[in-house]
Amino acid sequence: QVCIAIKRAYVHKDIFDQVTGHLAELAKNAKVGDGFAKGVQFGPINNRMQFDKVKSLVEDAKKNGAKVLAGGAPLEGNGYFFPPTILTGVAEGTRIVDEEQFGPVLPVMPYSTIDEVVERANNSEYGLGASVWSTNLERAQEVADRLHAGTVWINKHSELSPNIPFGGCKESGIGKQMGDFTLEGHTEAKIVRMAKAKL
């Protein structure tokens, strides 16, 4: 439920089953419950409207052929608890891929080539953050340079520092916060211009 959470993932087709299987295991083993309870990793969704939206996105995905590898429905009982959910069998053009879910649901899609996945990743109205995961750091840097996002992490995600600017592009905001950009944003420039004396 944070703005820079990973909202969709692309995995190369050669390792797709391996990675999605691992993600599903992580999701199934995650502890969901009262955020103040010891060991809980996922608390409730913060309000009814957002809870209903997450449910709606998952139901829409399932109706459009999504395969649920973990989660997929609210937990029984009181509260807005929705377990970590991993979906495959989805694609661009479905709500769960195109919209921002702000909930514990991750659609995972295969790709074949770098050019293809960069085009697909950039084909969004949003551009706050992205991450590239690879053992080849040089290739990862090349991909990061091509992604249309305000921040691109390599082999990590969601890390922020007060001295490094943060902000999005496209429909994900205008301007930056933190770093020198923040100081400049709270500074009003004053210009004094003086005529040169005639000699």
Image (cartoon, grey):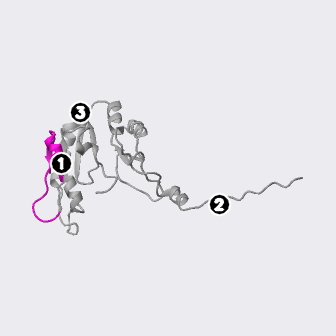
| Marks 3/2: CA–CA distance | 56 Å
In the picture of the structure, the residue carrying the numbered disc 1 is 58
Dot 3 or dot 2, earlier in sequence: 3
Badge 3 crowding class, 10 Å Cα cut-off, few under 14, some 14 to 19, many 20 or more, is: some
Where disc 1 sits, the SS reads helix
| Residue 91 pos. (x, y %) | 23, 37
Residue at left 20%, top 58%?
A: 51
- Relative depth, front residue between 33 and 44: 44
Q: What stretch of residues is rendered in magenta? A: 55-79
| Residue 27 pos. (x, y %) | 18, 51
> Which mark is nearer the camera, 3 or 2?
2
In the picture of the structure, the residue carrying the numbered disc 2 is 190
View extreme (right): residue: 199
In the rendered structure, are the residues bearing label 1 and label 3 in contact, judged by CB atoms less than 8 Å apart? no
Badge 2 crowding class, 10 Å Cα cut-off, few under 14, some 14 to 19, many 20 or more, is: few
Dot 1 or dot 3, earlier in sequence: 3
View extreme (bottom): residue: 36
Based on the picture, tell me whether residue 35 belongs to the magenta stretch: no
In the rendered structure, are the residues bearing label 3 and label 2 in contact, judged by CB atoms less than 8 Å apart? no
Q: Is residue 107 left or right of residue 181?
A: left
Judge whether 37 appears above or below 82 on screen.
below
Residue at left 45%, top 51%?
A: 174
In the picture of the structure, the residue carrying the numbered disc 3 is 13
Amino acid carrying mark 1 in the image: Val
Q: Quadrant of residue 120?
A: top left
> Which mark is nearer the camera, 1 or 3?
1
Residue at left 39%, top 49%?
A: 172
Q: Quadrant of the N terminus?
A: bottom left
